[in-house]
Image (cartoon, rainbow, N blue to C red):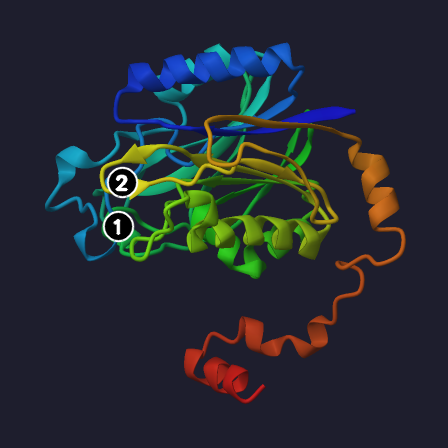
Amino acid sequence: MTTIAGVSANFTRDLDQNYALIETMVAQARERGVDFLVFPEAAIGGYLSSLGNHGDTVKTTARSLPPAITLDGPEIRRVRQIVGDMVVAIGFCELGTAPDGSEIRYNAAAVLDGTQVYGSYRKVHQPLGENMSYSAGDGYGVFDTPVGRVGLQICYDKAFPEAARTMALDGAEIIASLSAWPAARTATAENLQDDRWTHRFNLFDQARALDNQVFWIASNQSGTFGSLRYVGNAKVVDPGGNILATTLLGSGMAVAEVDIEETFRAMRGGMFHLRDRRPDVYGALTDTDHTAAWKGLTHA
């Protein structure tokens, strides 16, 4: 059996606050026997303070941006010291280098423990002006870890079935979906649990798990930061799309004990969505001529 968990919590620009919160969540997870713990997007240094036309940009609001760090830097080392033998996924702003030698930023995540970094990911799909602050990644990886083969994705990625499917086809058993997912900016529901963006967040989690018959761990920021109000709802979803545990709007952990091998055997024994695909009829999905692709979809 493997115990997996997603975190809902509020992370800010204050790195000391981040480390203290990580320590608290890891201690609580250890008490509950958690093997794999998924922290939110931007858990090291916080997310952007706003999105859309008023989003943060390097040129205009550099002071409000999260600190840009490297995988081998002191910030990741500190996290590894905290987590010890527990495997965690965690989000941060990664410092990279452009072809011309200039510094660029990525919205990134890594899966690691106290001994090593097993793999990292740079967010591919960018919503609502996020590209004003971050460069986009260009691929998905799946990483062998002590808890199984793990795929990483960040927030808006979950709206694109191709992202999770790519990882599932690469043998992902668990997909960690790290988010800083806010409530709707207009006509926000009085109860955020009823908000339309909360509904989409939860629906995507269940659909992607079921689409690909994988375990899905969703983490999310909670509370507020800048102009954003986060919806929490960290959860664990099984390969049948069933929510095994959720935090709803609150901060905390969604924890579930699962038997990965036996669950796959049972749920993939009849209908196995990956086996039953028909890639010979999916040509429009890989058509890089957007005009042709949209025409095909319009007339489908």
Could one spot residue 124 in this view of the protein?
no
Q: Residue at x 44, y 55 (%)?
A: 196
Q: Quadrant of the N terminus?
A: top right
Identify which residue, 233 or 79, lies in the foreground.
233
Secondary element at tag 1: loop
Q: Which residue appears farthest toward the left when viewing the image? A: 60
Left or right: residue 13 versus residue 191 is left
Q: Which residue appears farthest toward the bottom when viewing the image? A: 299
Left or right: residue 132 versus residue 200 is left
Quadrant hosting residue 21: top left
Q: Amino acid at mark 1?
A: Leu
Q: Amino acid at mark 2?
A: Leu
> Would you name the residue on which mark 2 appears?
48
Which percent across, then down, holds residue 256?
Answer: 68, 28
Q: Residue at x 89, y 51 (%)?
A: 269
Q: Residue at x 24, y 45 (%)?
A: 50
Q: Is residue 105 above or below residue 90?
A: below
Which percent across, then down, holds residue 226?
Answer: 23, 37
Q: Residue 51 got which mark?
A: 1
Circles 1 and 2, Cβ within 8 Å, touching? The answer is yes
Which percent across, then down, holds residue 273?
Answer: 76, 59
Q: Disc 1 and disc 2: Cα gap in Å?
A: 7 Å
Which percent across, then down, holds residue 244?
Answer: 68, 36
